[in-house]
Amino acid sequence: MYMFDELFQSFSTVSYLIVLIFFILLGYRPPWWSRKSLDCRRRDVQDIPGPLSLPFLGTRWVFSFGGYSFNKIHEFYKDMYDQYGAIVKEEALFNVPVISVFEKRDIEKVLKSSGKYPIRPPTEAIAQYRRSKPDRYASTGLVNEQGKSFLLFYINTIIQ
């Protein structure tokens, strides 16, 4: 009690008001004041981890300057999985986000919820690689097919 009396005597009421106004103007709120912590807010595409994205180039720079090549794209995706986890964000040209999903249960969720004729940005690196090897690949793959060609490819894959 003695300590509080001393404290109040050393500061005037005006100084307390000045400090209070200062905190109000700064917008200071204790962490418990608002519920916008990472645990409470909805996660967004920007929260998904991934390699550094450059303006306009996105993450495609890793194939030119990052030590990866289109011929060994599987090494790039293995490193992405090891470094960032089961869901990774890449960015295509002009910084269009492309989400890569590596685990079976997540892939099933994406394919089942994308509709009958999905239109989504292709993973450019994989599409380019598969197009460069027509002797091995007849298409760009289930994930990169769009619209009706996706449905036909999907049905043929299930039947086989």
Image (spheres, rainbow, N blue to C red):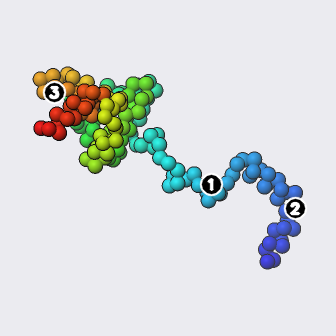
Q: Amino acid at mark 2?
A: Ser
Task: Of the two numbered discs 3 and 1 on the same chain, state the one appearing first in sequence.
Answer: 1
Which of discs 2 and 1 lies nearer the camera? The answer is 1
Q: Is residue 31 above or below residue 78?
A: below
Near-viewer residue (130 or 16):
130
Is 79 located above or below residue 21 in the figure? above
- Outermost residue toward the front? 116
SS for tag 1?
A: loop
Q: Quadrant of the C terminus?
A: top left
Residue 79 seen in this snapshot:
no
Disc assigned to residue 34: 1
Q: Quadrant of residue 54?
A: top left
- Are circles 2 and 1 on residues that touch, CB within 8 Å? no
Percent from the top left, x then y, of residue 153? 20, 31
Crowd tier of the residue under label 2, counting other residues whose Cα lies within 10 Å: few below 14, some 14–19, many 20 or above: few
Mark 3 vs 1: CB contact within 8 A: no
Decide if residue 13 is in sight here: yes
Count of residue discs? 3
Q: Position of residue 44 (x, y in %)?
A: 47, 43
**Closer to the camera in the image, 104 or 84:** 104
Q: Image point 46% across, 26% down: which residue? A: 55
Q: Judge whether 102 appears above or below 34 on screen.
A: above
* Residue type of the residue flagged with mark 1: Ser
Residue that badge 3 annotates? 137
- Pointer 2: what residue? 12
Residue occupying the point 67% across, 54% down: 29
Precedes in sequence: disc 2 or disc 1: 2
Q: What residue is shown at x 39% (from left), y 25% (from top)?
A: 93
Q: Residues within 10 Å of mark 1 (few under 14, many from 20)?
A: few
Q: CA distance from mark 2 to mark 1?
A: 30 Å
Mark 3 vs 2, N-terminal side: 2
Instruction: Determine whether the residue tagged by mark 2 lies in a helix, strand or loop.
Output: loop
